[in-house]
Amino acid sequence: MASLSLHNLNKIYDNNVQAVFDFNLDVKDGELIVLVGPSGCGKSTTLRMVAGLEDITSGTLIIDGKDVTQMPAKDRDIAMVFQNYALYAHMTVYENMAFSLTLRKEDPNVIHEKVLAAAEILGLTDQLNKKPRQLSGGQRQRVAMGRAIVRKPKVFLFDEPLSNLDAKLRGATRREILLLHKRLGATMLYVTHDQIEALTLADRIVCMSMGYVQQVGTPLELYDNPANIFVASFIGLPPMNMFDARVEDERLVCDGFDYPLSESERALLRDYVGKTVTLGVRPENIVPDNNGYLKASVTLNENLGQNTLVHGTVGGHKMTAKVREWCNYKKGDEVAFCLNRVHFFDKETTNAIR
Ligand code: ADP
C-alpha cells in the first residue's frame, strides 16, 4: 500500500478541452478518497491520469514517494476496477482472477493461494469454476475486484464501479467495498457521480465541478460546512434550500419571510448589511413550529416512513422540509416553520461566509 500525491495536475485534451485544472491532493496510506461531481466535471480524467491511461499535461504525480508522472501504466503498480467489469468471457472466474499473475509468470502455487484468498474475501469460493455469463452483475463486479486484489497493488482505482448495478445491488456492493477497504487497509481512489456513495464510502471526499476541485474534506465537513453553493447543493438529498436574503441589522428579509439573526450571525454578516446574500438551509433543518416565522403553503406531502418530505412554497419560492414524523398535510395547508441551522453564501463569489 502507498501514499499518493497529485500536484497541480492539469489535463488539456488534443481538441484543446481543458478537463482538469490545477488538481492538488495528498492521499494518505490506506485512505479511501472519493472523487464526486456531475458528469463531465473531470473525475474520470483525473483517475485515468493516475492510472497512466491519459498523459498528464502538466503537474506531478507521486506514488509511494516516487515521481511516476512519465511512467507507463503497467509499471505504476496500480489496479483499476471499471463499471463494465471488463472480464474475459471465455475464462472462468478463477482464470479471470489469476490472469494478471499468470501473465507475470508467478509461481502457480502462489497464484493458487492468492486467488483462493481473494475469493474467500469476496465470497466467490463457490463460483470459481463458473464463466462470467453465469454470474449476477454483483458477482461479476466482485470478480473484477478480485482481479485487482490478487495483484496487491499500491493503489486501487475505482471508476464508477456500481453504476451498472440495480439499486438494491448497488447498496449491497457499496457496503462490500467499504468492508473490503477496512479489511485490506488499501489506498483507494474512487470515482462516482453519486453523492450517497461519496458520503457513505469516503474517508475524504473531493467534490469537483467543471474541472476544478471545489472542496476536499470528510463527508461531515462537506455536509455540515460546504465551501460554496455548488457543494452545498450537490451534497445532500433533497438538496439544500436556497433563498435570496437582504441583510438588515437584526434580520434577513427573504421573499415571504423574515429570518431573525442571532448575535453570532449578525457578527458574521456585519459587512453585508444592506446587501443580498444567499441563505441556505437543509430540509431537515426546516422544522414545524406553531409560532414559526416561515409560513409555507403545502404543495405535496411525501411520506417516506421514518419521515415526511413536505414540499411547499414560500413567497415566490419552492421549498422542501424533511420532517421527522409521519405527516398528513394536504395541498394548500398553511404550515409554520422555524429554521434550525442555516448557511450563508456570498452571492457574487458563491463562497460560504464564515
Ligand atoms: P467525468 O468523469 O467527471 O464525467 P471526464 O473526465 O470524463 O468527466 O470529462 C471531463 C471533460 O473532458 C468533459 O468535458 C469531456 O467531454 C472531456 N473529455 C473527456 N475525454 C476526452 C477526450 N478523450 N478527448 C476530448 N475531451 C475529452
Image (spheres, rainbow, N blue to C red):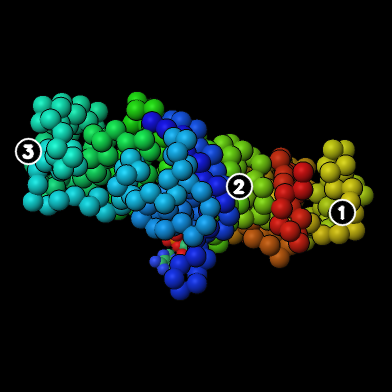
Q: Which residue is mark 3?
A: 129
Q: Which residue ends up furthest to the bottom in the rendered image? A: 15
Q: Which residue is mark 1?
A: 272
Q: Would you say the beta carbon of the disc 2 residue lies within 8 angstroms of ligand 1? A: no
Left or right side of 252 for 217 = left
Upstream in sequence: badge 1 or badge 2: 2
Judged from the image, the secondary structure of the residue bearing numbered disc 2 is strand
Q: Which residue is mark 2?
A: 215
Say which amino acid is labelled 3.
Asn
Upstream in sequence: badge 2 or badge 3: 3
The residues bearing labels 1 and 2 have C-alpha atoms spaced at a distance of 24 Å
| Classed neighbour count for the residue bearing mark 3: other residues with Cα under 10 Å, few (<14), some (14–19), many (≥20) | few
Q: Camera-side residue: 179 or 317? A: 179
**Figure quadrant of residue 296:** bottom right
Image quarter in which the N terminus is found: top left
Judged from the image, the secondary structure of the residue bearing numbered disc 3 is loop
Q: Could you tell me residue 171's position as x and y percent? A: 35, 41
Q: Quadrant of ligand 1?
A: bottom left
Q: Could you tell me residue 112's position as x and y percent? A: 12, 29
User: Residue drawn at (35%, 55%), measured in percent from left and top?
Assistant: 53
Image quarter in which the C terminus is found: top right
Q: Camera-side residue: 260 or 107? A: 107
Q: Name the front one of labels 1 and 2.
A: 2
User: Residue drawn at (26%, 54%), measured in percent from left and top?
Assistant: 84
